[in-house]
Image (cartoon, coloured by chain):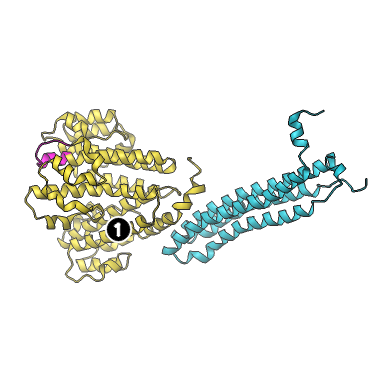
Chain colours: A yellow, B cyan
Amino acid sequence: MYGFEALTFNIHGGYLEAIVRGHRSGLLTASDYNNLCQCETLDDIKMHLSATEYGPYLQNEPSPLHTTTVVEKCTLKLVDEYKHMLCQATEPLSTFLEYITYGYMIDNVVLIVTGTLHERDVQELLEKCHPLGMFDSIATLAVAQNMRELYRLVLVDTPLAPYFSECITSEDLDDMNIEIMRNTLYKAYLEDFYNFCQKLGGATAEIMSDLLAFEADRRAVNITINSIGTELTRDDRRKLYSNFGLLYPYGHEELAISEDIDQVRAVMEKYPPYQSIFAKISYGESQMLDKAFYEEEVKRLCLAFEQQFHYAVFFAYMRLREQEIRNLMWISECVAQNQKSRIHDSVVFIF
Amino acid sequence: MSSSWSRALTQVSPYTFASIGIAISIGVSVLGAAWGIYITGSSLIGAAIKAPRITSKNLISVIFCEAVAIYGVIVAIILQTKLESVPSSKIYDPESLRAGYAIFASGIIVGFANLMCGLCVGIIGSSCALSDAQNSSLFVKILVIEIFGSALGLFGVIVGIIMSSQATWPAKTA
């Protein structure tokens, strides 16, 4: 019952909510980022990070440090925290936490299938997979030749099985098909997650609806922009948009027929929340769009912490950590390649 | 000749009402206190992992919840001293009925006021623990809210005792 969650939430979720809020206080702040942006080498970065919560994870790394090592260890910290929370959780929080990882699973599946198509070694690909999206039979993906086999051999036993009904074809896998498969799977996953949150009701449903609607809309815009000028037909493009969100259904109709970025901008400016995003980037420039979307997403995620007694704080925390890891990766790459002038292009401050 | 429904009320012994009132006063107060304590306690334990300094100060929230149960015990003890025996010819006198109803109402007042008070203090205590873990200057400010919340239980106790003080049973003389 909305408004009375405070009475019973703490029975099962109180301890974990307090833990996740404790983790949130360990996110890097603007002053940490300022220190990191002024580092000259990766060893300086390691030294600064040792003073933060990442200390225990990085201190045993030998110098010379690689950027991939930094990112890997930071991701390891996130995975450890997630696993700790997952094993303490009861229903329905445990299902909610598992839903958060399905996105990573989809990315891993697509990574392995694409890599196999380009004749890469399976072991090398497995090392690049995101640890939160691993499942047992993932290595068998390299054997599949088309989508039907993909489903029958591997994916039918995973949680992704129900998302496959819309995209099974008998065509062989190629780059275009794989991208369409990724977006179809993700669409089904977002809709499933949205319905699950609606069933949970209360504050969780309200806050997650907002966060997932933003995600769906952002993906719709990205799909549109990326498919301008490719052979993806308008109907196919239309089929990749999710069935919820601010843009559904009228915005989707207009986005499906857009042929360049200015038309996309014209569509999005009709919606006040997205108008402010598009106002930040001037005409003809789409590189900053990603950063503008990330900034808006971070703002909404931080707002999820304002309310107590709901599950969206877990989702928000995972996403904020992901953003932090992206920031660290960008900073490390800029420092390693001596391009410090471009550091502020893509770092999104969380607090 | 009273109808069957009013007989249901006036023919129930006033001792029944009084005893139920005493039971509610202690039982429901303890329910409120326990509810409040677990709401605060679970958040406090989780938050104290990252910020161990909050544990000793935030036990105040638990103490406020506990006070609610103590109010219930005190009022139950006071109420049970008001129970007196009357000769069986006088059990259904208006005086006796009034005394029985007064003790019953007193019990309900105290029980439910303490239930709500315990819940209120518990929820605020949970938010207090989580806020204190992030920013220690917030603790005292949220404590003021808790103090106002715990006053609710006191209101219930005061009114309950006033109600029960006028529970006089008829005199024993024939």
Q: Is residue A202 left or right of residue A258?
A: right
Queried whether the magenta region covers residue B60, the answer comes back as: no
Q: Which residues are magenta?
A: A168-180
Q: Is residue A302 left or right of residue A172?
A: right
Coordinates of residue B23 in the picture (x, y in percent) = 68, 50
Task: Answer with the quarter of the image where residue A326 lies.
Answer: bottom left
Which of the two residues, A280 or A107, is positioned nearer the viewer here?
A107
Q: Vertical placement of A243 versus A302: above or below?
A: above
Task: Answer with the quarter of the image where residue A286 lies.
Answer: top left
Q: Amino acid at mark 1?
A: Leu
Which of the two residues, A153 or A321, is positioned nearer the viewer here?
A153
Coordinates of residue A76 in the picture (x, y in percent) = 26, 61
Q: Residue at x 30, y 68 (%)?
A: A56
Q: Residue at x 33, y 61 (%)?
A: A31
Coordinates of residue A258 in the picture (x, y in percent) = 19, 30
Coordinates of residue B40 in the picture (x, y in percent) = 52, 56
Q: Is residue B51 left or right of residue B22?
A: left
Q: Vertical placement of A111 versus B63: above or below?
A: above
Residue A119 in view, yes or no: yes
Q: Which image quarter is the C terminus of chain A in?
A: bottom left
Q: Residue at x 23, y 46 (%)?
A: A157
Residue A29 in view, yes or no: no
Total count of labels? 1
Q: Is residue A309 left or right of residue A335?
A: right
Give the residue at the far right of this rendering.
B174
Residue neighbourhood size for the residue with mark 1, other residues' Cα within 10 Å, grouped as few (<14), some (14–19), many (≥20): many
Queried whether the magenta region covers residue A174, the answer comes back as: yes
What residue did someone put label 1 on? A78
Q: Residue at x 29, y 40 (%)?
A: A190
Task: Answer with the quarter of the image where residue A68 lies.
Answer: bottom left
Write down the chain letter for disc 1.
Answer: A
Which of the two residues, A242 or A68, is positioned nearer the viewer here?
A242
